[in-house]
Image (cartoon, rainbow, N blue to C red):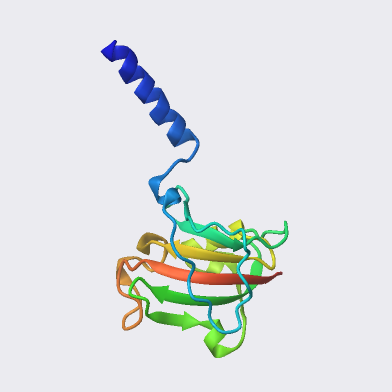
């Protein structure tokens, strides 16, 4: 009987792993305060984050259309970045202009995360240090191994 229960529990555990179940996915977190100039969050957007195998956490705040960028494409975005403390370290919204770059020319968390949202969409990214600037950080701006948070609107794919 004990052996049957252990086999059953192992099967349930395997099913949960195979379906991508994660406790982090169930935790609902309030939406961030939108910076001035940001578009609206979709009424049906989930307050729960999804975690990828790499450790990136994200939630789609506005899906956009079906066209998603690849790692080899360039994108035009508006973004707002902050540390766990809430301190904003960079924001195109505050500068009043979008920015364009190749997805393969930025931190790994951006390359992975931006491929998950469609053109005209909005995504919130929680990027662990290993997918950002690692233990070196950016002196005076981003501490080593810092988890970075971004709100990003995908304006265009080039």
Q: Nearer the viewer, residue 80 or 112?
A: 80
User: Relative to residue 148, is residue 60 depicted above or below?
Assistant: above
Q: Position of residue 77 (x, y in %)?
A: 61, 74
Farthest-out residue, bottom: 95
Q: Position of residue 118 (x, y in %)?
A: 67, 61
- Judged left or right of residue 23, residue 38 is right
Residue drawn 44% across and 34% down?
Answer: 16
Q: Position of residue 65 (x, y in %)?
A: 72, 60
For the N terminus, give its image quadrant. top left
Residue drawn 45% across and 41% down?
Answer: 21
- Judged left or right of residue 64, residue 3 is left
For the C terminus, give its image quadrant. bottom right
Residue drawn 47% across and 66% down?
Answer: 107
Q: Position of residue 46 (x, y in %)?
A: 54, 56
Farthest-out residue, top: 1
User: Relative to residue 59, is residue 1 depicted above or below?
Assistant: above
Count of numbered labels shown in the rendering? 0
User: Relative to residue 13, is residue 23 depicted above or below?
Assistant: below
Q: Nearer the viewer, residue 59 or 132?
A: 59
- Judged left or right of residue 132, residue 58 is right
Residue drawn 67% across and 59% down?
Answer: 68
Farthest-out residue, front: 43
Tell me which corner region of the image, top left, top right, bottom left or bottom right, holds residue 88: bottom left
């Amino acid at each position: 009987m004990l052996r049957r229960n252990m086999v059953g529990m192992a099967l349930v555990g395997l099913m949960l792993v195979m379906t991508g179940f994660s406790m982090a996915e169930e935790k609902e977190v309030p939406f961030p305060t939108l910076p001035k100039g940001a578009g609206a969050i979709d009424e049906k957007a989930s307050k729960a984050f999804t975690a990828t195998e790499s450790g990136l956490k994200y939630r789609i705040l506005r899906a956009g259309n079906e066209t998603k960028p690849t790692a080899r494409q360039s994108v035009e975005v508006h973004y707002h970045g902050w540390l766990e403390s809430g301190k904003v370290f960079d924001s195109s919204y505050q500068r009043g202009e979008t920015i364009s770059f190749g997805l393969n020319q930025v931190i790994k968390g951006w390359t992975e995360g931006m491929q998950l949202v469609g053109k005209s969409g909005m995504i919130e990214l929680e990027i662990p240090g290993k997918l950002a600037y690692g233990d070196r950080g950016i002196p005076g701006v981003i501490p080593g191994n810092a988890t970075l948070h971004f709100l990003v609107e995908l304006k265009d794919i080039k």
